Image (cartoon, rainbow, N blue to C red):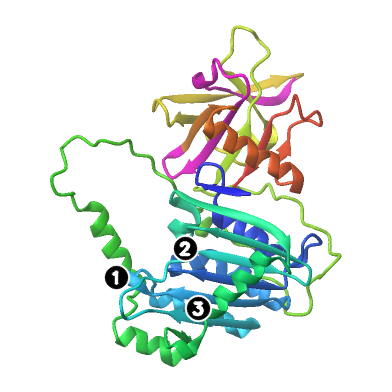
Amino acid sequence: MFYNQPLAVRFGTELLRHVDQVAQVDPFWDTLDIAVAWVRASGMAYLSERLANFLRHGGQLSVVVGIDIQNTTREGLQALLDLEQYGRCETFVYHNEAGSVFHPKLYLFRNEEEARLIVGSNNITESGLYVNVEAGLQVDTDVNAAVIAQTLDALSSWKDTTSRLAVRLDRDFLERLVRGGYVPDEAAAREQMRRERTRPARGRENAPLFAGRRFVAPDLAAGGGRRAAPAARGQAPRRGAAARPAAEARVPAGTVLLMRLRKAHVRDRPTQTQIPIRVADTFFGGVTEVQSSHSGQRHGIIEATARGGRNTMKLEIPEMRDFVQPVARFERTPEGIVYEAYDVGSPQGNQIIATLEGGRRDNTTQLSISDAERATWWRPI
């Protein structure tokens, strides 16, 4: 599987789904190895609870993290240390004083027979997990495959403390990192990022040369990325437990929905689509209009009735007038829902439909009716 974030996949959502499979039938991961350049509290806020649950279920976690360019924070490392109370967990800090930057990003899940390796560009930061344009490749293979052996060798080399490039993290070493100025506090790191983003580039013309498009991470305060507290270690189901159905709870700002749209049957309305009530009441709940990221225009959502009751919600999407198989990406932001629409056959459309089809295999894509050819499809990412 290829991860194209944020268009068709958000890595944080997928990562949490893989971690949660600890208590599901297919597959069951016993071990998770991570190596990233940077970790921050902003990223661990989404992962800590679920990784703690993974450890409570008997999973083993090993993390190697870099501290270069002051992009790893004290709070991010502390969050990794805090996980050790829940089970078998270790963290190594890798740094080369000669200046070579530790820059890998890989996630390796294993059980006694299978392995899932993800290599890409996603660090454990809020932006890396959800917002930035990132790419990754997932490979599912036998645990004894050559590529897994090579990956484990790489991880072992990065954790080799005899090289003195890697040090096992504990509370004393974290304090030494802070005192030595190797890692900043989260607030200082955020302020530095803010200054970098707002500083005008030297020689830049007044008019921007590129478009601007805002992407938003899920709202943790509204429940994004979190679950109810897990059971104590030893009390949760293991192999053979039934998979949980996809939830259709209230959707917080920053959540993205991919859809395969159905055009209206009326010939003179080639730009109208119908939003099923199930998704209208969840993702679109309380929203009366959406905004096109292509034109900036806003389009109202109109309730349709049949036999005295609500049937669907109608929505005009002018961009799909000449599309054969339209797909769309809707994103909830604090300013409202923004959408972009594409035809399957275009690069963007192909990525979206591939994610929707992948979701049909694991039941994360839902259908409005049982006939898949005629149905509206949707999947939160």
The image shows residue 129, relative to residue 158, as above or below, that is above
Q: Nearer the viewer, mark 2 or mark 3?
A: 3
Mark 1, secondary structure of its residue: helix
User: Amino acid type of disc 3?
Assistant: Trp
Mark 2, secondary structure of its residue: loop
User: Amino acid type of disc 2?
Assistant: Asn
Residue 335 part of the magenta-drawn span: yes
| Residue at the spot of label 2 | 123
The Cα–Cα distance between marks 2 and 3, rounded to whole angstroms, is 17 Å
Q: Which residue is outermost to the front?
A: 146
Task: Give coordinates of residue 66: x percent, y percent.
Answer: 42, 74
- On residue 188, the disc is 1
- In the picture, measured across the screen, residue 214 lies left or right of residue 197, that is right
Residue 67 part of the magenta-drawn span: no
Query: Toward which corner of the image does residue 256 lie, by quadrant?
Result: top right
Range shown magenta: 308-336
| Residue at the spot of label 3 | 158
Query: Toward which corner of the image does residue 294 lie, by quadrant?
Result: top left
The image shows residue 314, relative to residue 36, as above or below, that is above
Asked whether the viewer can see residue 262, the reply is: yes
The Cα–Cα distance between marks 1 and 3, rounded to whole angstroms, is 28 Å
Q: Which residue is outermost to the top?
A: 268
Q: Nearer the viewer, residue 343 or 106?
A: 106
Q: Which residue is outermost to the left?
A: 203
C-beta proximity under 8 Å, tags 1 and 3: no
Task: Give coordinates of residue 326: x percent, y percent.
Answer: 60, 25
Q: Mark 3 or mark 2, which is nearer the start of the sequence?
A: 2
- On residue 294, the disc is none
Q: Nearer the viewer, residue 347 or 341?
A: 347
Mark 3, secondary structure of its residue: helix
The Cα–Cα distance between marks 2 and 1, rounded to whole angstroms, is 19 Å
